[in-house]
Amino acid sequence: MASADTEYSQTLQHITDAKLKELSNKRRIFQERKTTALQKADSLDSLVQKVRALSDGVKKCFDIRIDDDGRVSDKSESNRQLVTELSNIDRFLKQTEYDPSISTDTLERWRCSLLSLLDVQTLKYEYAMLFAQLTMEWLFVKKSPKIRSSEDKNDEFEKLASAQKMESKRNWEETVFKPADVDADTITAFLGDLFTSPSGPVEDETTDYAKDVIKSLEKLREKVSKFEDELTSSAQFNSYTLQWVIRSLLSSDLPTEKQRAALREFLKDNTVLIELADVLNMRLTALDTWSWGPEVLVEQRRQLNGSYRIYMHEDLIQAIFLQYMGIKWSVFFKKSLTEFRKRKGIWKSPRSTVPDIDKKRRRFYLDSPVTDKPSLQIVRESIHFNAYFVSQLLDYEQQQRDVAEGEVEAALFKKKSKKTAVHPAMYSASSPKYSPTSPAFIPQGQMAEFSAAVDEESDEDMGFGLYDGEDIESEYEDTYDNHNFAQKMLKPSNPMQAKQNLLLLLGADTTIYKRLYGEITCFRAEYESLYPKLPHATILTILKFLGVSEKWARFFEKFLTAPLRFADEPDVEPRLRCRGTPGSHVLSEVFGEVTLFCLDFLINKESKGESLWRVNDDMWFWSRSQDTCVTAWRAIQRFSQIMGLPIGDKTGGAHITSEDRPKAAINSELPSGRIKWGMLYLNSESSRFEIDQEMVDGHIGELKRQLQDKETSIFSWIQAWNTFASTFFTYNFGTPANCFGQQHVDMMLQTHERIQREIFSSEQGTGDHSILTYLRETIQSRFGNTSIPDGYFFLPIDLGGLELSSPFINLEHEKYTRLKREYAAKDKDRLVAQNKGYRPDDIDTFMSFEEYTRHRELLNYTPGRQLVYVYDDLLRHPPQQVIGYDKSGPISVGLAKLQGQNGLSGIKSEWHDMSPYWQWVAQLYGPEIVDRFGGFNVVDPGLLPIGLVSQFRSGRVSWREE
């Protein structure tokens, strides 16, 4: 199929061809001139004449301008060091005509220096040609994908994948064309109870709470009504609006390649944008009559790794219109639901359960007023509020999210035989932005072992938003932002990092709860294919309850009930979708997040202020009280049953106790399976997340197959290695943190070593089990290059390297005793006056240790270092060790030569501008590179087809296949 980016791709191809042709010509000319210079020097007898001949030859080889008498006259800054050296040799050679004191050793040193210049440049051209050959090899593979023979051992997987395709399609059809069994009246009654009934026994306090919730709900409904009017009362679309809408649409996987090309053309033509805005404004004005049309074609498309997804082929104007609607509603609900939570008394907190008398007594006995220092609970709530509350909704219209390639959670699917793992989604290499609706992938080699789960319309994390800090009336105004604790937890850059942070939060609380209370209970659950199975009645009932008008409800219902027909079934009548949301649409994210907001509120209400830690449909809950966990789990089950949302198999629970307590089984009502994340599982015996080595084994086998499939191209092979072996494995092993300890780091390193050893071990079990050995031997066998230095493989692409990635509370008693001693010496009458006449009955006896520690998580009255500092320390990542740097050594000399070179992404001219990773690479491999190439540039700047390789690595260009 011809690429929609044909013109762009061909232009880039022509530029690349020109560069490679120029490189070949330059190398040929250089070699001819070098040979001539060497032959002339060898034919001369005098050492002075040999040096002069070599000097003249170097000038010709490097195109250095000279004056009439042969001296250097080049003022070029790009070859300043070379020009300076040649100019000096010219002067020294002139001196030899009159100065007989110039020794033979000095002349020999000049000769060796000139020969070294020629040898280094020869080496640079050799590696420039190697880079060009690797580029062309990659291009050839992309144009002509590997064709397997009939005897290919992966044929069996192809047949099984075909069966999987049919089974997945059948399951998808059985799901989306059959209405869910839910009752709108039951949902409405449930919501009415959730948002209007007291949270406990009917007392004055709980009645006031119910009134506050009702009042806040009415305010939310008013905002919805006002927003609807604003959205349809004026011209929403203009050329500026369409710019960010189209860019957002391009970041999704909804448009086809042909549509992407058209969208890019739209962005270049303001006249087209103005005309398009007129059409879209008319469509918005006639919202009541909007429809999908007679049918929307869908296609089951095979991914690179063998999985299949359902794609809707709607027209471009429709796609732009719906993208805009989705973004506007997403931003609105993020702001409105955030304001709902911030209103006084709405979102419960365990801090509100502390009796006033306890606060008074602490203030009196500790003689310490309330400070600005937050408590542990405030920090915990702040993390939840900023990073996990309705986090899939957008903060602002132009929001995009970054994600590193390979940062995808490994998962276990249903299997027919043995346990089998799923490898990471093969995102395009070095993808600059994260698409909120990017597809999930399943490895080709393991398709037969997975059940045909209905996940073609991805229920992955389709977006990620962070609170923007708008001030409204709040009981805890500024509390969530006015502290410096756990800062990295507050603003995860994407859902993947947010999920990974959950492990740290649970790990930190496990350490604290075990020490303080002797136990902690936790569980994890996930919905089964949330978006494909989300009932329409559930979505519409919740939206109407929150104030969405009938007009907009009808629009949303039309959006959900699209008339679908598979493109390869022309004789089949289109069928109306009865369940689930259209994949890759922002409106689908809105429906899912607004639905699960109700669950968040339910858990907060039922568990007396505890939080459900949720990223999309991935739910975590933990508490020091097992009964509270049971309450939360019952609430999730009740909510799920009423809303028609089946809970998937990825559930697990754990009850962890301290070493001095007898082991107790987890409550039978809670999930009994292991709590797993990525390739980690929570070991309730050790209270640690440990790597599931059996799961690693499955991924090693899949990695072997993936690398085997990429073996026809070195660049493709390295791209696959970096994604799987480095980023994916590292991400799924969890990040090192203080709460995990050194043992976790050691376990990660040992597993990485095992992965590389098993991937590169020979069948005979002998040889160097190293990725470098494999790449070095492969390049030598294909292109003849020998003696390749180690650093060449790890240097950045922009310096001519291959950019291979390398993976590899006892103090409370002391404080209590000190405070007790200090209290005994204080003037009690002063304390009474200072506390507005409050006088405890037991004023002469200091509070007990039990009372002193009773609210250590919830209050911030304690002077000195509080529990929140321990919490903050546990969540910290251990600092990366700084590698030593000799400012006068060869590394410094090599870095200095990079000054003025633009576009460097890894190794840079300034040491402190590099990340610790690149500092390590520079120091480890730099001496050999600088010695062999005279600096860090393996190839001279400008000779490399960097643009072409960058586009390959970003996945932007689709080359012609014929």
Image: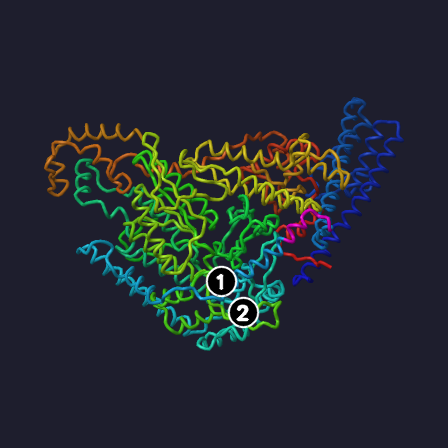
Residue 156 located left or right of residue 62: left
What amino acid is at disc 1? Answer: Thr
Q: Quadrant of residue 92?
A: top right
Quick check: 950 left or right of 396? right
Q: Position of residue 177 (x, y in %)?
A: 49, 66
In the displayed structure, would residue 885 be above or below residue 137? above
Looking at the image, which is closer to me, 39 or 664?
Answer: 664
Q: Residue at x 13, y 32 (%)?
A: 827
Q: At 56% from the left edge and 31% from the top edge, which residue is drawn?
A: 885
Residue 872 lies in the magenta-colored region: no
Quadrant of res 795:
top right
The kind of residue on which mark 2 rests is Leu
Task: State the residue position of label 1.
Answer: 175
Check disc 2 and report the residue beneath it.
564
Can the viewer see residue 766? yes
- The answer to whether residue 430 shows anywhere in this view is no
Q: With respect to residue 321, does 501 lie above or below?
A: above
Span shown in magenta: 150-159
Q: Residue at x 19, y 41 (%)?
A: 358
Q: Residues within 10 Å of mark 2 (few under 14, many from 20)?
A: many
